[in-house]
Image (cartoon, grey):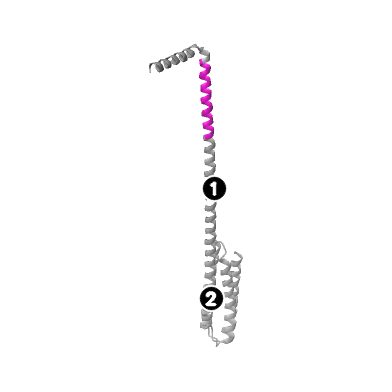
Amino acid sequence: MDKARSLFIIVALLGGSAACNRTPAEQQQQAVEAQNEANQKINEAAREANEKTAEVRKDVNDKAAEVRKDYDKVIAEGNEKVAEAKQDARETAASAQAKANETIRDANRDIVAADDGLRTWGQEKIDGLNNAIDETRVKAEAAKPEVKAEVEAGLKDVQAKRDAIVTEFASLDTKSEKTVDKFKSRVDNEIDRLKDRVDRLERKL
């Protein structure tokens, strides 16, 4: 133990002696070199950290872009299906209304005036107007909401005037030829005006 301790003391003294033998300039240079080496390692560590950070951010951005792409695709597909469903519903409703109108026309035939000639003439006039109304209403299903609302309001007014004419047919006294001719002339003009209005509404679509 004494020999080992003595050897250690000698080495320490020699080392300290060597350090003490360095000039201040050499010691300063050694400190600068140590700091430069430390700076190099710090810069390398920072560069590696920046590279890894950039890689992680790129990976996150790529994955986020894929998620957004899938999300936008799902939303677009959903909106398309909703639009198709609404269009199908509108077309079904229009078709159902057209069939209902046909049933209504059949019922209206029963209340038209008893005279065969007048009934045939009147029914052709009313049917022509009804067909124009139905065609315009079906076309209106594909129009913009505001245009559709305007056309539908106009068609309802036309239908109200048409129903009034049908009621007149039912109550008309066909015994007087003069009365029938006067009625036919007036109804002919009224239905022509109603058809013209339907045509104007259709041109809005």
The correct choice, above or below, for 4 with respect to 114 in the image is above
Mark 1: secondary structure: helix
Toward which corner of the image does residue 128 lie, by quadrant? Answer: bottom right
For the stretch drawn in magenta, what is the main secondary structure? helix
Residue at image position (57%, 66%) is 140
**How busy is the neighbourhood of tag 2: few (under 14 within 10 Å), some, or many (20 plus)?**
few
Circle 2 sits on which residue?
99
The residue indicated by pointer 1 is 65
Q: Position of residue 30 (x, y in %)?
A: 52, 18
Rendering coords of residue 50 (x, y %)? 53, 35
Image height check: is 120 above or below 191? Answer: below
Q: Quadrant of residue 165?
A: bottom right
Other-residue count near label 1 (Cα within 10 Å), few / some / many at <14 / 14–19 / ≥20: few
Disc 2 marks a residue whose amino acid type is Lys
Residue 150 lies in the magenta-colored region = no
Point 52% across, 41% down: residue:
56
Quarter of the figure that contains the N terminus: top left
- Taking depth in this image into account, of 194 and 20 the one nearest to the observer is 20
